[in-house]
Amino acid sequence: MRKNPYLNRLPVRDPARFYGRKREVRRVMAGLAADPPQSFSLVGDRRIGKSSLLHQLQNPDVLRTNVPETVVGSLRLRYHDFQSGAPSDEPAFLEFLCRHVAAALGAPAAPAPSRECLLDLLRQLDAAGLRLALLWDEFEVVTRHRGLGLETYAFLRSLAQNHRLAFITASGRDLRTVCHSAQVADSPFFNVFQTLRLRPLSREEARLLATEPSEAAGLPLGAYADRLIDDLAGTFPFFLQIAGAALFEHLDETGAGAPDFAAVEDRFLEESEPHFRYVWEERLSEEERRVMAEAARGRVTTATSRRVAERLEREGYVAKRDGGYAPFSRCFARFVRESLDEATTAEEEGATVMGETRADTSRLHGAPPAAGVAGPASRRISTPGPLGPGSVLLGKYEVVSELGEGGMGKVYLARHIDLGRKIVVKVLNPQVAKAPDMITRFRREAMAASAIGHPNVVQVHDFDWHEDGRPFLVMEYLEGEDLAQRIYGRAGNESHPLAPREALEIACAACEGLGAAHDRHVVHRDLKPSNLFLARPTGTTPSGPRGYVVKLLDFGISKIVDVGAAQPLTRSSGMLGTPCYMAPEQIADATSAGPAADQYALGVVLYEALTAVLPFEAGPAMSRPFWPNPPPPPPPPPSARRAGIPPALDEVALRALAFYPHDRFPTVHAMADALRMIDAG
């Protein structure tokens, strides 16, 4: 087997493996060589190569190629990625800056960082004839931080104006659009930047990426470069890596001869489909989705649609074909058509499941019923004001008690007044409910969870609006305990690893629920023991491993918390999920988690259920999204931590925990099949 040169999904550090961006590199280097050095803002979609470009700027060979030798000797570059969090206020930010400037000077860190201390360090830098470029990745984490106000940004501007200091930032959107306030967005600080927008590669650059790495590996793909571009990846470097990996692996397995492109496409979609879904659901605006749908069906005919298509063409999402516009690849065009068909089906199914009718069209677009519209004659009047014990939602759900609160909103125990059964109600908090896109996504996820309809997934009974305009979900009420309580006790300080047979059965049930969700294109993205509930029939007590039903909780809700979502919903780290359970690709890019990431998390849960120990601790390395290459070694097998675990169960757990997604099981269905073959006693 040859070494596949297209498997890297991390930022490219080696210039020999970095394709395209020569114009951008030359422009930034020319700016750094100017006197004073110039600042740049690199802006582009995720996975477009912003971090890779920042790493190239630090490479000595790239520096020597693009700037005069005298500048190379005087230039100092300091890289930092804010994905792991930003300083919380100006004193913390000053400490951060003083540390980096001191390191560039080779001076000791300041004992008491301050503005004056930072200015003194920069004066030393100027006196030494040095110039400093601060390379800041994920800079929008900083601009969104409310602890840094207008005065801080005015001070940063003065540093760039009065010293040989330049800022090179990378962000997903223009910096002024990702500030925590309009006042900060209007700060003159942002005037110091030249904006460089990163778009997909040129076709020639894309051909080089599809050709040269494979030639060096001894299995040239050059003859298929155009097909990889037109059928699968377009000229996006990330999709080209996935497409190249799929074709290279296929040819290496089958030997010489014409490839089976249907099989290659299947491999490509296993990894790329979640990213396709991100582009379709999160990256494109409603207007752009409409035009993309027209392009997928060859119907871009109006002047307005053509203007939008031209904009999408500049961004690489649309290509000119046969005198018209089409999505960037035939594979993505088919994905768009299928998504449109699924949306229609899901809406119809969701309307049926939730008791809606086609006549009630106001609810099919994420908006509450119009004011003054009367409900059924028998409907009781709801309780006005804040929710609490005794409150009534829409005349039929009486709140009994509050169960918990999070960044999204509150969870209540309630009862259905007419049916007398207990239920759980989740209500968005007022701040979140002000964002129209969040309401739309909340409803869409409610429909997705409802449409899964699997006994191992918590059931959604209803979706509606409170009179104050906030949407809420009504879900089944469960009695029992979650897996975390089963392993660690209710206080969380005990240790009760499960018998291998019970752990296996729980993992199988979780596979069934996840598999049903994945089949509906729903990814959990925050699977952990506390989201696996061991539900027993109401009014009974546990009676051994078969006395409960495993239920996956919070399906789809985690998908609401996403890059690009309303800022109050994002964690300060920018990560989506719980670090101990996050797959490497999810740590590298919070929004890229697909079905394979759910499988990885389930592998962690299985390992933990067997041993009451995590396979990997969430230490500082896991706050850094770009993992080492080669990958870290696998954890010891569960049997090394606890006797009596069958070797076959070790193998399943470790395969699910494989660093690369393609080394895990093809699906969670396949993982369940492997588990069922094990004799765990």
Image (tube, rainbow, N blue to C red):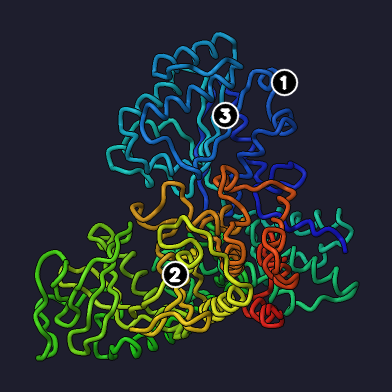
Q: Quadrant of residue 268?
A: bottom right
Residue drawn at point x = 48 percent, y = 75 percent: 293
Dots 2, 3 in contact, CB < 8 A: no
Q: Quadrant of the N terminus?
A: bottom right
Distance from label 2 to label 3 (Cα)? Answer: 56 Å
Q: Which residue is under mark 3?
A: 31
Distance from label 3 to label 1 (Cα)? Answer: 15 Å
Q: Nearer the viewer, mark 2 or mark 1?
A: 2
Q: Which mark is residue 482?
A: 2
Q: Which mark is residue 546?
A: none
Residue 186 at least partly seen:
yes
Amino acid at dot 1: Glu
Position of 307 with respect to 105 (left or right) is: left
Residue 24 picture location, percent across and down = 61, 41
Q: Quadrant of the C terminus?
A: bottom right
Residue 251 picture location, percent across and down = 84, 70
Amino acid at dot 3: Gly
Q: Is residue 237 above or below residue 293?
A: above
Amino acid at dot 2: Asp
Q: Which residue is under mark 1?
A: 69
Distance from label 2 to label 1 (Cα)? Answer: 63 Å
20 and 118: which is toward the camera:
118
Q: Is residue 257 above or below residue 237?
A: below
Helix, strand or loop under label 3: helix
Mark 1 burial class by Cα count in 10 Å: few <14, some 14-19, many 20+? few
325 and 94: which is toward the camera:
94
Helix, strand or loop under label 2: strand
Q: Is residue 332 above or below residue 190?
A: below
Position of 457 with respect to 446 (left or right) is: right
